[in-house]
């Protein structure tokens, strides 16, 4: 009851903001979304002097401690208050990382003609791991790369949708990983040559959910130092499994668990990643230019009609180019693939760097590109009758 009161109180305070203080509203589901929104918000405030209103569903969102004269954060939870906040939203623009707008309980505003803008929190394609109508009801999509433009236009044609505004944006997390890598290299910090990062996706077909700790056991039997980085949804939905892995780590100094979604230390420390269909594999390969060993598990599919688009998802297309695919229960093949990459990484770095430039827009400057577009769009919306 206290939490509901707090959410309602925060929503009431949000509604008291003057119009100029909520020209653009950012909404995030959790504190981890600051990785994607934070750079854009910072650029808007510092370079374009835009005031930001920020709604979050996380009580622990670090942004709640960042309030300033140009940044007003509010906690609205993920229940009824959030639902009503969306329906009654009065602002020229909302920017969000949550897909499926209008499809379920999160609706477009009925109080004002709001311009809804989507920011990706993964580099993966739009039509297999997301639901079929995940992006249909947005007005603008800030695209990571050309693959998003092709897919969204194809979906619009296939389902006779109106054309959205597609902005060649890029990917903030990749930019930060590149900056962190550059900083680490400048300080002489190099990856541990024998450390492996296990970072699978989540869901019933994911490595940990479907195969438990078998890969962990095989890697540790080969005396490879291992960091396990479960997906946050795995940690949320399968706490018993995570507890089991943590107990293993307590008894084994060569095994550790990284549950901090915003932490990059495990990315920097490791030399090879093992994954399945996780979007983190693309970040690792293209940002750190380190190899990935993919376990041959069924893809994560949330859209059973994805093949109707006639476009191979980028995460499927790049698997062979960014790494090696091995059977999930073949511990010997897994260890052999890891050891092979540990011996030769330079050739891999050259390939990864070239691929990065091909599939990601505005590498190193995505935040400013997004902020400049938002600032310009707000000026236009301010001149329009519904702005």
Image (cartoon, grey):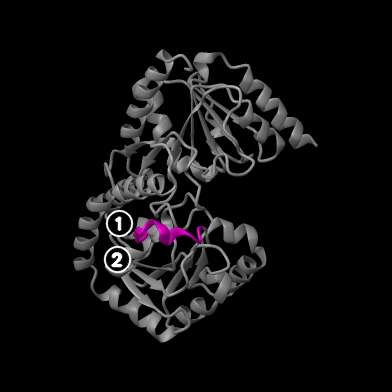
Asked if residue 189 shows in the view, the reply is: no
| Residue 46 is a magenta residue | no
Q: Nearer the viewer, residue 78 or 128?
A: 128
Judged from the image, the secondary structure of the residue bearing numbered disc 1 is: helix
**Gap between marks 2 and 1 measured at Cα:** 8 Å
Q: Which mark is residue 83?
A: none
Residue 219 placed where, x, y %?
A: 45, 79
Question: Badge 2: few (under 14), some or many (20 or more) residues near its Cα, within 10 Å?
Answer: many
Please report whichever mark, 2 or 1, sits nearer to the chain's N-terminal start. 1
User: Residues in magenta?
Assistant: 303-314
In the image, is residue 307 part of the stretch drawn in magenta? yes
Q: Is residue 134 above or below residue 207?
A: above
Foreground: 367 or 383?
383
Q: Mark 1 = which residue?
A: 286
Residue, x 72% and y 31% (percent of image)? 6
Residue 320 in the image, given as x and y percentages of width and height: 30, 70
* Residue depicted at 40% across the width and 39% down the height: 141
Q: Which mark is residue 322?
A: 2
Provide residue 3's location: percent of width, then percent of height.
74, 36
Residue farthest along the front direction in this orientation: 160
Q: Percent x, y for residue 376?
A: 34, 22
Mark 2 residue element:
helix
């Amino acid at each position: 009851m206290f939490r509901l009161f707090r959410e309602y109180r925060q929503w009431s305070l949000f509604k008291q903001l003057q119009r100029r203080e909520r020209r653009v509203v950012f909404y995030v589901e959790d504190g981890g979304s600051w990785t994607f929104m934070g750079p854009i918000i910072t650029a808007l405030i510092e370079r374009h002097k835009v005031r930001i209103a920020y709604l979050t569903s996380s009580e622990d969102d670090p942004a709640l401690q960042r309030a300033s004269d140009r940044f007003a954060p509010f906690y609205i939870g993920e229940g009824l208050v959030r639902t009503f906040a969306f329906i009654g939203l009065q602002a020229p623009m909302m920017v969000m990382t949550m897909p499926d707008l209008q499809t379920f309980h999160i609706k477009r505003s009925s109080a004002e003609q709001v311009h809804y803008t989507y920011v990706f929190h993964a580099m993966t394609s739009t039509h297999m791991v997301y639901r079929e109508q995940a992006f249909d009801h947005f007005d603008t999509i800030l695209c990571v790369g050309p693959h998003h433009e092709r897919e969204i236009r194809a979906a619009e044609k296939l389902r006779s949708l109106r054309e959205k505004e597609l902005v060649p944006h890029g990917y903030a997390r990749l930019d930060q990983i590149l900056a962190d890598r550059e900083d680490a290299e400048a300080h002489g910090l190099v990856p541990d040559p024998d450390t492996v990062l296990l970072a699978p996706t989540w869901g019933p077909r994911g490595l940990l959910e479907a195969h438990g700790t078998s890969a962990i056991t095989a890697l540790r039997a080969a005396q490879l130092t291992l960091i396990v980085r479960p997906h946050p949804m795995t940690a949320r939905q399968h706490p018993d499994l995570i507890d089991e892995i943590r107990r293993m780590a307590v008894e084994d100094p060569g095994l550790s668990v990284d549950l901090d979604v915003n932490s990059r230390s495990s990315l920097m420390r490791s030399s090879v990643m093992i994954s399945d269909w996780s979007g983190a594999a693309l970040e690792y390969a293209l940002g750190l230019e380190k190899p990935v060993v993919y376990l041959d598990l069924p893809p994560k599919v949330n859209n059973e009609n994805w093949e109707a688009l006639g476009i191979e998802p980028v995460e499927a297309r790049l698997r062979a180019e960014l790494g090696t695919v091995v059977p999930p229960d073949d511990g010997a093949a897994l260890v052999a693939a890891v050891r092979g990459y540990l011996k030769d990484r330079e050739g891999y770095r050259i390939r990864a760097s070239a691929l990065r430039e091909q599939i990601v827009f505005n590498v190193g400057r995505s935040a400013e590109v997004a902020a400049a577009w938002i600032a310009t769009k707000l000026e236009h919306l301010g001149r329009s009758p519904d702005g």
